[in-house]
Amino acid sequence: MLEKFKFWKHEEMPHAEALPPIPNLPPMEPLAPAQDPNFQQMAQISNRTSDKDLELISAKLDVLKAQLDNIMQRLERIERQSQDKQEVPRVRW
């Protein structure tokens, strides 16, 4: 079963001289993020999505504020009704 695996002894390992030569390539100069076109494209996409996200969050906050205002109005009405019942005791004969 282990015959399929080839284990080299240190002396039998291929040497660097046997490997093909590596071609000489000009050194790559890293681009600054602002000059990299991929970075600029991703930044634009990110700005668009963040703008959409902010609009969505703003809309949801507006809905929550309207619902909270509605709840506050209901609570004030219930409190007024409760106070009216307590203030005017009616005598029933």
Image (tube, rainbow, N blue to C red):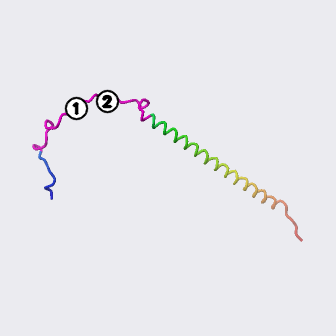
Residue under the point 10% across and 44% down: 12
Label 2 vs 1, first from the N-terminus = 1
Residue under the point 51% across and 38% down: 47
Highlighted range, magenta = 10-39
Q: Where is residue 59 in the image (x, y as percent from the top left)?
A: 61, 46
Please tell me how crowded label 2 is: few (under 14), some (14-19), or many (20+) other residues with Cα within 10 Å: few
Quadrant including the N terminus: bottom left
Q: Does the magenta stretch include residue 38?
A: yes
Q: Which numbered disc, 2 or 1, marks the residue closer to the eye?
A: 1
Residue under the point 42% across and 35% down: 38
Q: Where is residue 20 in the image (x, y as percent from the top left)?
A: 17, 36
Question: Which of the two residues, 72 or 61, is positioned nearer the viewer here?
Answer: 61
Locate residue 55: give its quadrant.
top right
Q: How many labels does the image show?
A: 2
What amino acid is labelled 2 in the image? Met
What amino acid is labelled 1 in the image? Pro
User: On screen, 60 above or below 20?
Assistant: below
Q: Does the magenta stretch include residue 25?
A: yes
Q: Is mark 1 on a helix, strand or loop?
A: loop
Q: Is residue 72 left or right of residue 23?
A: right
Q: Which mark is residue 28?
A: 2
Residue under the point 69% across and 50% down: 69
Q: Is residue 89 left or right of residue 70?
A: right
Q: Is mark 2 on a helix, strand or loop?
A: loop
Extreme-bottom residue of the structure: 93
Quadrant including the C terminus: bottom right
Disc 1 designates what residue? 23
